[in-house]
Amino acid sequence: TMDASTLKKYLQCPVCWYIPRSKIFVCSNSHKICESCFAKIQTTVNTNSKPCPSCRCHYDDPPHRNLDLESIVEKSNVELSCRRPQCLVEMTKDKLLEHEDECELRTVPCPNTSCQKEIFFKQLEALIKIVHPKKCFECEIYEARFVTKPKPNIDYDLRVLESNKVHFYPQCVK
């Protein structure tokens, strides 16, 4: 049997060091890369293809996928990283989706609709107190959380920030 840390080393993208959560592409020499890193590779002008970061050979167009590795990631209980930049949380995929919905490092727009700033959720209280002390809200945000109110037969959930039993900041999520 293989322990979790060894499995993680085999599955990690060699560019970003995360375990891919979607497609895994391979070059003609079978070096793997996650879909996110593949999208960031610049196409070379003379060959009109993307070079492999490991060996500099070129990916086919469309690139070949490693379905075996994708299946191993999908079926294993290896811990995955949160998709939010700067969040260091790693958990199994069944718990991670819930964490990402509530992650303090997710970006949200300012509740003041004329502001148009995107900030980390954990900075929302400071933004309201410092940038919009009189324009926004008179309530203080402690223990703020999103409340999802699902409606039957509708593709969108309405999320509302709840603070001190006051609901504000509506957000529709598909």
Image: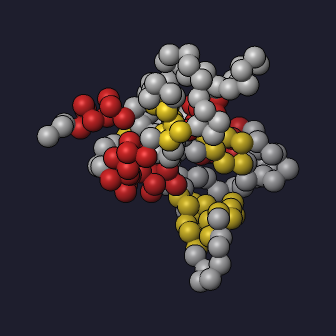
Quarter occupied by the N terminus: top left
Q: Tell me where residue 2 appears, x and y as whole percent.
A: 18, 37
Q: Is residue 133 visible?
A: no
Report whether 18 appears left or right of 155: left
**Nearer to me, 167 or 18:** 18
User: Which scheme is used to colour this image of the protein?
Assistant: secondary structure
Q: Is residue 10 visible?
A: yes
The residue at 44%/41% (across/down) is: 66
Looking at this view, name the residue that lies furthest to the left: 1
Q: Is residue 68 above or below residue 9?
A: below
Q: Tell me where residue 155 appears, x and y as whole percent.
A: 65, 73
Total numbered circles? 0
**Nearer to me, 17 or 2:** 2
Corner quadrant of residue 157 = bottom right
The residue at 56%/19% (across/down) is: 57
The residue at 27%/35% (across/down) is: 7
Quarter occupied by the C terminus: bottom right
